Amino acid sequence: MRAHQRDFSPDKRVLLLCAIAIVIGAISTVAAYVLLNSIHFFTNLFFFQTFSFEDRSPATNTLGVWVIALPVIGGLIAGLIARYGSDKVRGHGIPEAIEAILFRKSQMSPKVAVLKPLTSGIVIGSGGPFGAEGPIIMTGGAIGSLIAQNFSISAAERKTLLVAGATAGMTAVFGTPVAAVLLAVELLLFEWRPRSLLPVILACAVAAFCRPLLLDSGPLFPIHTAPVGLTAFGICIVAGLLSGMLSATMSLALYRVEDLFGKLPVHWMWWPAIGGLVVGIGGYFQPRALGVGYDVISDLLNNHIVLSVALSLLLVKMIIWVVALGSGTSGGVLAPLLMLGAGLGAVIANLVPGSDPTLWPLVCMAAVLAGVLGAPLTAAIFALGLTGDFNALLPLLLATGVSYGFTVLVMRRSIMTEKIARRGLHIYREYSVDPQERAFVSEVMSTEVISIAANLTLREVAQQYFDLDQKHRSFPVVNEQGALLGMLDRELLLTLVAAHSKDHSLAVLFENVPLKFALPTETCQVVGRRMAIQHVERLPVLADKESKRLIGVISRSDLLKPSHTAFHEEHVRERLFKA
């Protein structure tokens, strides 16, 4: 058995990250509590002119036509905060978190941690058709990043703590820790390592345990559907396809609207106010389209809204959501997507007599989310966590998979990545085990090594190894015991010849040369990174650090061997059983 071959790379620093993640999980829960109460406060202030933290729906207001002005005011305030505070508060939060993770070394500012929940509270409280999840993901991520910046850790470790804060905030808002962890895996971490997964799990678990202390416990939309039979299989596929189509349509519409705003002859600071005007008009005709809309989602899931009213409400919700988000204001996408998906499911339930009318709103709710986010497992488990309905697990899994497959095939990017791509930054969301991580130096190195004896003079070395028939760019220099003294290339040889007599032996000149080497038990990925950092094309391979005995050489071309194997596995098609 080879002791160096492990399932996971050992890293005891994960213990430090886990300890910090526990603190981040608790603080993010408090941040979620503050965000939700700020939404309640501003809702009461805008729609009912009272100072209260009571959870009230803006649909019960008595303002009449004056309700149109409220989203405009909220959008104007959001624009001012974005321009003179931080433009990072614009958008729905998740793309901004991804951009910070991949392109800004997971560094976020204190301004974002303060201004994002404030701006979102004002926008949603004034009627913005958004949810709290995007803002809390951004806010929790900022908290994680800020805490991480107080420790001497790497950018990769800081990313883990940023994601821990983001997912802990999501857990606190929705009470869905498993879905939050899956969101990290499918959308935020861009890796699957114990170093990143364990701190995220701990942060989400802490948030889930702390949530009942500050917020309501239990599922947000508790329902119980009947067990499904084989007849539901075909309906799930149709529901998944329709949800995928709706996801693609909304994604394309959103960025078409954003393009139209970009053509306006006014500063982007004014765009949220313009979008707020459309929100206000829509809210005047359909008051229940304003705000977060958790009550509407609950009614749709429980089949408490007649089809004609549901269609009208959802049409208005779709329009004002696309326009408001396209204007660059602040708010989350999950709650609106849940409502729109549930509305699609309500239509399907009316077209499928005899089936459970509460099942299909739930299934489509998750399937639309899967199509928009490009995260089917997150969507299925998220819906399960929101309702606690395990009877729906199989339909959820099938429909979210179909919706995800549809959007992957027909769309180049999702809502989560399109905005980042428009800034000239590319994100590739597929990841797998690097073939260089699976291969060790001992498997690819060259064992037939041409080495230089240390007792040779500079003159002899130049004549024998660096003439017109030079075989390699550099050669290992070894003493009589076969121990490595260093690597010699033409550039170093010319430097030595210029500084010393050609009759000097290499043994004297290499006495204090720092060794650069690889070990046979190291992976190709580790050694490849070392070669890039040290700007070398070949490294000698030693049996161990103590003896320094040379056993081989690894070159950049050797590092390509695992990739050749991976290419063969991916692209060479062969039929193993022949008739």
Image (tube, rainbow, N blue to C red):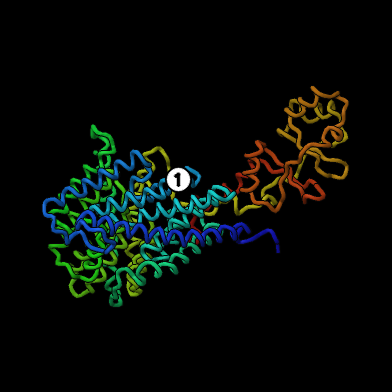
Q: Would residue 31 be found to the left or right of residue 356 on screen? A: right
Q: Would residue 560 be found to the left or right of residue 372 on screen? A: right
Q: Is residue 511 above or below residue 572?
A: above
Question: Residue, x 44% and y 47% (percent of image)?
Answer: 110
Looking at the picture, which amino acid does disc 1 mark? Ser
Q: Would residue 520 be found to the left or right of residue 559 on screen? A: right
- The foreground one among 227 and 567 is 227
Q: Would residue 381 be found to the left or right of residue 6 on screen? A: left
- The foreground one among 102 and 535 is 102
- Where residue 233 appears, as percent x and y from the top left, is 30, 69
Report the residue marked by disc 1: 109
Q: Is residue 86 above or below residue 234?
A: above
Label 1 residue SS: loop
- Where residue 483 appears, as percent x and y from the top left, is 83, 44
What is the quadrant of the N terminus in the image?
bottom right
Q: Residues within 10 Å of mark 1 (few under 14, many from 20)?
A: few
- Where residue 111 appears, as percent x and y from the top left, is 41, 45
Question: Residue, x 69% and y 43% (percent of image)?
Answer: 554
- The foreground one among 304 and 273 is 273
Q: Is residue 378 above or below residue 268?
A: below
Q: Is residue 238 visible?
A: no
Question: Residue, x 45% and y 59% (percent of image)?
Answer: 27
* Marker count (numbered): 1
Outermost residue, front direction? 51
- Where residue 369 appears, as percent x and y from the top left, is 32, 58
Q: Is residue 235 visible?
A: yes
Question: Residue, x 27% and y 61% (percent of image)?
Answer: 52
